[in-house]
Amino acid sequence: MNFLLNQLLSLRQMEYLALNRELKILETSLGAQRFADCPNEVMLGKNVCLSFPELIGVEDILIAILEGKQGHFELKGIGRGSDESNPLYINLYVINTRNKEDTENQLMIFIEDVTERMVLEQKLVQRANEVSLLLEAWDSSNEYFNKIIQSLADALLVTTRSGLIKLVNQATEQLFGYRRKELIGQPISIIILEYQILLEASQQYLLSQEFFHTVEVMGLTKNGTQVAIAFSCSAIQTNTENMQEFIYMGRESPKRQ
Amino acid sequence: MTSTISKKICMLGDFSVGKTSLIRRFVDRQFSDQYLSTVGVKISRKIVECQLVEPQKQVNVQLLIWDLEGNTKFKTVTPTYLQGSSSAVVVADVNRQVTIDHISDHIQCFLSVNPKGFVIVALNKSDLLDEEQRGKLLDVFSLQAPDQVIATYSTSAKTGLYVDEIFKNLAYKMLDP
């Protein structure tokens, strides 16, 4: 390898190995050993797979490159060693080079030190994966609570302080004959005729902080049928803007029918 | 005289399913709860002694285990990493359904590069399930597994459950002519 090329490679933190058809090392740059899995095996006449085990299994590809049947081969981001405090990452590039002095083709393996970039990449990937795991856990927990809410036998309604419906469950849809989409954002008065009674019960809860004040009110289904419903009322403080929301849970009441 | 042959195995799966931990358990007999994401690829080696019956002899299989960076929404495995590998371990986390849903994608990805290859599926972090749940999951998964999947195990890198079995099974299978 000529002097100028050697200088260029060292500027790029690159080393090289020249191999023959048997994948034996014919020539090596001074620093190539540093990048080997087994540095002692980087010796003239030794098979390159002993020092660079990542080439095991791809011998056919290397021969194809030597024979000019394939252009090149590269393996990027190979981590070396198990010491996390002293990481080393390399890229391997394999090309064919015709030696002018004798007619035999040679394989050239260029080894590039990419530790700096890979360490940075590791930090970014670590952060991104941690965020993804957090989102997955949040989704999963959300799905779990949603399943509980949807499987409740009692009708559940959550409204804003002004009485706009924010959440309903399946039992609510069944009780009033509306679909969820038809109820969300609508005033609760479209399904509860005596909404004022519910509101008062909720406000009473806010004052006393006693759970489950049960009140009976008349509800109105989509097809115009009136049903008596016993509701328990409570309220929560939301994290956003410190707003209160009212929670109603009820079922058909046999008493007033 | 005992002969030694080297074989390449790729570990595939979504990120944070425990690929690195399974290797660490098998090679170093260690486990850490700390999550450190793998970038690029890291290669570990371990020799498995295989006793052959016909002809009766011992063969040492040097497993070169390629720990590949886990797949994410934005990054899939680099096909050149898979070249020259006759087998793969596809890993999923039993507590994350999305990683189980992706098992077939990983198998297809591996087989598209190595059509004659074979796969073992590791349903990892199984120590977080009870025995009944583990059995149920295995039953469900084994029914859907393609022919190239030679076995499915409920594994735990934490306890060591079925970890050695995966790699020993692969080592013997790779010796089959």
Image (cartoon, rainbow, N blue to C red):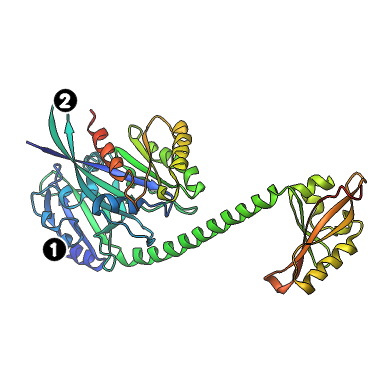
Indicate the amino acid at tag 1.
Leu
Residue at 18% x, 62% y is A34
Q: Position of residue A228 (x, y in %)?
A: 89, 51
Taking B155 as reference, is A242 above or below it?
below
Classed neighbour count for the residue bearing mark 1: other residues with Cα under 10 Å, few (<14), some (14–19), many (≥20): few
Residues at marks 1 and 2 on the same chain: no
Report the front residue among B31 and B117: B31
The label shown at residue B54 is: 2
Residue at 87% x, 56% y is A216
Viewer-nearest of discs 1 and 2: 2
Q: Position of residue B44 (x, y in %)?
A: 25, 51
Q: Quadrant of residue A245?
A: bottom right
Q: Chain of mark 1?
A: A
Taking B159 as reference, is B108 above or below it?
above
Report the front residue among A206 and A212: A212
Q: Label 1, on which residue?
A: A30
Indicate the amino acid at tag 2.
Glu
Report the front residue among B164 and A91: B164
Taking B97 as reference, is B58 above or below it?
above
